[in-house]
Image (cartoon, coloured by chain):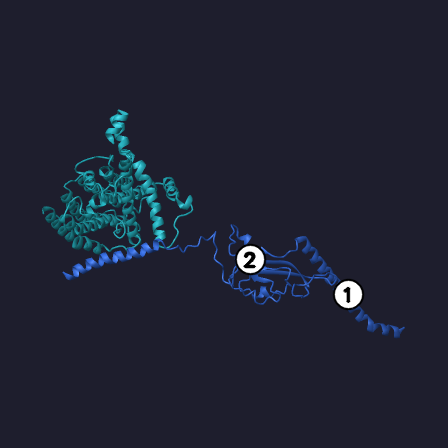
C-alpha cells in the first residue's frame, strides 16, 4: 500500500520535473544555424574545392603523380628558346606551356595529396564547398588559360622548334660524320 | 444562436445549416491549422530548434501550404481494402469529434445545442470516434493498422471510465449536466471556479479544493489518453506501428484524421476548462459590464473560453514533448490500477463533502 502511494507520488512528481525542464527549454535560444543564410566558419585546414593558380604553375606533373584517383590531367608543351614564358611569383622561370590542366572534381577525394608536392604552391584547397551541378561534365574544371588556337600554335611552335633542333642535330651529326672524312678526302686530294 | 438566425433568415433549414457550420468554419478549421503550426513551433522551441519559418512571416502560412498539398494529393485506396468502410472511417471520426462541439458553450451567447444532457451527450458521441478508428484500422487490411485500431479501442474504452467517474463527481458538485449551466455557476471571480471549490462557501469550499485538484488531474490524464496523444499514443506509435490506424490513408482522408485529432484536443480541453476553470467566465469581471456595453460581454467570454481552451491544448503539446510513450501494459496499469481507484475514492469523498 505504501508502495502504491509512493508510485503515484513519483509519477506525478517526475512528470512535473520533466515539464519544468521542457518549459525552461521553451525560452532557451535555438541552436539552429540557418545554413544558406548563415554559414559557419570552416576550420583552417578544411579541404574543399581545389584551385590552381595557373600563373604560378610550372607544369612539373608532380600533382598528377600524387593524385590517388587520377583526377588531374596535365598536358604541357615545351616553350621555344625564343619565347619568354615569364616567371612564377616565386621567381622560378617557366619552361613549359600548359595546354591543358583539368581537374575532375567529381572524382576528387579531397585528400590534399596534390597540394603537398607542388613546388610553387599553385594548387591548393579553397573554402568553397557549394558547387553542385546538374551535369557531371560541368564538374571537370579547366584551369589552363591558353585558348585552343593558342595551344595549337604553341604545339606547332614546339614541333617546329623540335624539328629545327632535330634538323640541327642531323646537320651536326652529318657535320660530325663528314668532318673527320674531310681531311681524308683532302689528303686524297 | 439558432433562434437568432431563424429570426433573421426566416428559414429553419438555412438557419440550422448555418448554426451547424458556423463553429466549423470560423473556429475549428482555422484553429486546427494554427494548432498544427503551434505544435510544430512548440516542439521546436522545446528542442532548441526554430521550427517552420519559411512560408510566410515566421512560417505562419506553413500549415496552409501543407493543407493545399494534401488536397492535391492522390487519394489512394489499397486494392485489398474494404472500400466502403475505408471511405467511411475518416468521416465518422471527424463527425464524432465535431459533434462534441455542439454541446460546448463557446460564450454565454453561443452554444450549438443547449441541451440538459450536454456532458452525457459529449461522453456518448466521442465513442463514435472509437468506432471510426476501429473501422479505419480494420478496413485498411494492414496488420499494423489493425493493431493500432485495436489498441486505440482498448485504450479509449478503458480511459472512458475515469473520465466518466470524474464527470460524475463534477455533476454531484454542480448538480447539472449542462455545460452552460456549469459555466454559469462559476461566474464572477476566479475563486468561484470549480478547481477552487466552486460556488460553495465556508469550510466546504476549502475541503473541496484538494479533491477538485485530484479530479482535475485524473480527467486531464484520461482525456489525454482518449484523444490518443503522447504519452498515450500507442494507437499511432510511429516507431512500432508505422502510424497505426491511419497508415494507409493519404490526401484529404489523412487530413480529416489529422483535423479530428486537433479538434478532439480542443474539445477535451474545452470540457476540462468548462468543468474546472469556469468555462467562458472571465477570472476578474468584464470590461463590458464596467463600461456599460452589455453586448461586449459575450465577445469577452468567447475570448476567455478560447484562451483557456488553447492553454490546455498547449499543456497537451507540452506533455507530448516531455514524456515518452507508455507501453501497453503500463497504459492499462495507469488506468485500472491507479486512476480508477483514485477517481472512485474521490467520487465518494466529494459526495460526502457535498452532503455536509
Query: Is there a contact, CB below 8 Å, between mark 1 and mark 2?
Result: no
Chain of the residue displaying label 1: A
Q: Secondary structure at mark 2?
A: strand
Q: Quadrant of the N terminus of chain B?
A: top left
* A13 or B74: nearer the viewer: A13
Compared with B144, B279 (above or below) is above
Q: Residue at x 27, y 58 (%)?
A: A17
Kindly indicate which chain is depicted in blue in the rendered structure.
A
Chain of the residue displaying label 2: A
* B68 or B214: nearer the viewer: B214
Residue A33: image quadrant is bottom left
Tell me: A168 left or right of B9.
Answer: right
Q: Which mark is residue A104?
A: 2
Q: Position of residue B201 (x, y in %)?
A: 15, 45
The residue furthest right is A189
Q: Residues within 10 Å of mark 2 (few under 14, many from 20)?
A: some
Q: Which mark is residue B270?
A: none
Q: Is residue B241 visible?
A: no
Kindly identify which residue carries mark 1: A168
Amino acid at each position: 500500500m505504501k508502495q502504491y502511494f509512493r508510485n503515484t507520488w513519483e509519477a506525478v512528481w517526475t512528470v512535473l520535473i520533466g515539464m519544468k525542464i521542457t518549459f525552461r527549454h521553451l525560452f532557451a535560444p535555438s541552436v539552429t544555424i540557418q545554413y544558406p543564410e548563415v554559414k559557419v566558419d570552416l576550420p583552417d585546414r578544411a579541404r574543399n574545392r581545389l584551385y590552381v593558380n595557373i600563373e604560378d604553375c610550372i607544369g612539373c606533373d608532380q600533382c598528377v603523380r600524387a593524385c590517388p584517383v587520377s583526377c588531374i590531367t596535365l598536358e604541357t608543351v615545351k616553350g621555344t628558346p625564343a619565347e619568354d614564358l615569364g616567371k612564377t611569383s616565386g621567381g622560378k622561370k617557366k619552361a613549359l606551356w600548359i595546354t591543358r590542366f583539368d581537374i575532375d572534381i567529381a572524382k576528387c577525394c579531397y585528400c590534399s595529396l596534390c597540394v603537398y608536392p607542388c613546388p610553387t604552391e599553385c594548387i591548393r584547397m579553397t573554402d568553397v564547398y557549394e558547387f553542385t551541378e546538374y551535369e557531371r561534365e560541368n564538374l571537370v574544371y579547366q584551369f589552363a588559360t591558353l585558348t585552343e588556337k593558342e595551344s595549337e600554335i604553341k604545339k606547332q611552335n614546339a614541333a617546329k622548334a623540335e624539328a629545327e633542333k632535330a634538323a640541327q642535330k642531323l646537320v651536326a651529326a652529318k657535320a660530325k660524320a663528314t668532318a673527320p672524312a674531310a681531311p681524308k678526302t683532302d689528303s686524297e686530294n | 444562436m439558432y433562434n437568432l438566425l431563424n429570426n433573421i433568415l426566416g428559414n429553419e433549414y438555412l438557419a440550422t445549416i448555418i448554426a451547424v457550420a458556423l463553429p466549423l468554419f470560423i473556429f475549428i478549421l482555422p484553429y486546427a491549422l494554427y494548432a498544427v503550426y503551434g505544435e510544430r513551433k512548440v516542439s521546436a522551441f522545446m528542442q532548441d530548434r526554430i521550427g517552420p519559418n519559411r512560408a510566410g512571416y515566421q512560417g505562419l502560412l506553413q500549415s496552409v501550404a501543407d493543407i493545399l498539398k494534401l488536397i492535391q494529393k492522390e487519394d489512394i485506396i489499397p486494392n485489398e481494402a474494404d472500400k466502403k468502410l475505408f471511405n467511411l472511417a475518416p468521416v465518422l471520426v471527424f463527425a464524432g469529434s465535431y459533434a462534441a462541439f455542439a454541446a460546448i458553450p463557446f460564450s454565454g451567447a453561443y452554444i450549438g445545442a443547449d441541451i440538459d444532457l450536454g456532458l452525457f451527450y459529449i461522453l456518448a458521441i466521442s465513442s463514435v470516434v472509437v468506432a471510426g478508428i476501429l473501422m479505419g484500422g480494420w478496413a485498411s487490411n494492414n496488420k499494423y493498422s489493425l493493431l493500432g485500431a485495436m489498441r486505440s479501442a482498448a485504450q479509449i474504452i478503458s480511459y472512458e471510465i475515469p473520465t466518466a467517474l470524474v464527470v460524475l463527481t463534477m455533476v454531484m458538485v454542480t448538480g447539472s449536466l449542462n455545460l452552460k449551466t456549469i459555466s454559469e455557476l462559476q461566474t464572477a471571480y476566479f475563486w468561484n471556479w470549480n478547481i477552487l471549490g466552486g460556488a460553495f462557501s465556508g469550510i466546504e469550499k476549502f475541503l473541496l479544493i484538494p479533491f477538485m485538484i485530484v479530479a482535475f488531474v485524473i480527467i486531464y490524464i484520461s482525456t489525454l489518453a482518449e484523444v490518443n496523444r503522447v504519452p498515450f499514443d500507442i494507437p499511432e506509435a510511429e516507431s512500432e506501428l508505422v502510424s497505426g490506424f491511419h497508415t494507409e490513408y493519404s490526401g484529404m482522408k489523412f487530413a480529416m484524421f489529422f483535423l479530428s485529432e486537433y479538434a478532439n484536443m480542443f474539445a477535451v480541453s474545452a470540457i476540462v476548462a468548462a468543468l474546472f476553470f469556469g468555462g467562458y467566465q472571465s477570472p476578474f469581471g468584464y470590461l463590458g459590464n464596467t463600461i456599460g456595453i452589455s453586448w461586449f460581454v459575450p465577445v469577452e467570454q468567447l475570448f476567455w473560453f478560447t484562451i483557456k481552451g488553447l492553454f490546455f491544448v498547449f499543456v497537451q503539446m507540452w506533455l507530448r514533448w516531455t514524456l515518452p510513450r507508455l507501453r501497453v501494459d503500463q497504459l492499462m496499469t495507469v488506468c485500472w490500477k491507479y486512476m480508477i481507484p483514485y477517481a472512485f475514492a474521490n467520487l465518494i469523498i466529494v459526495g460526502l463533502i457535498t452532503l455536509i
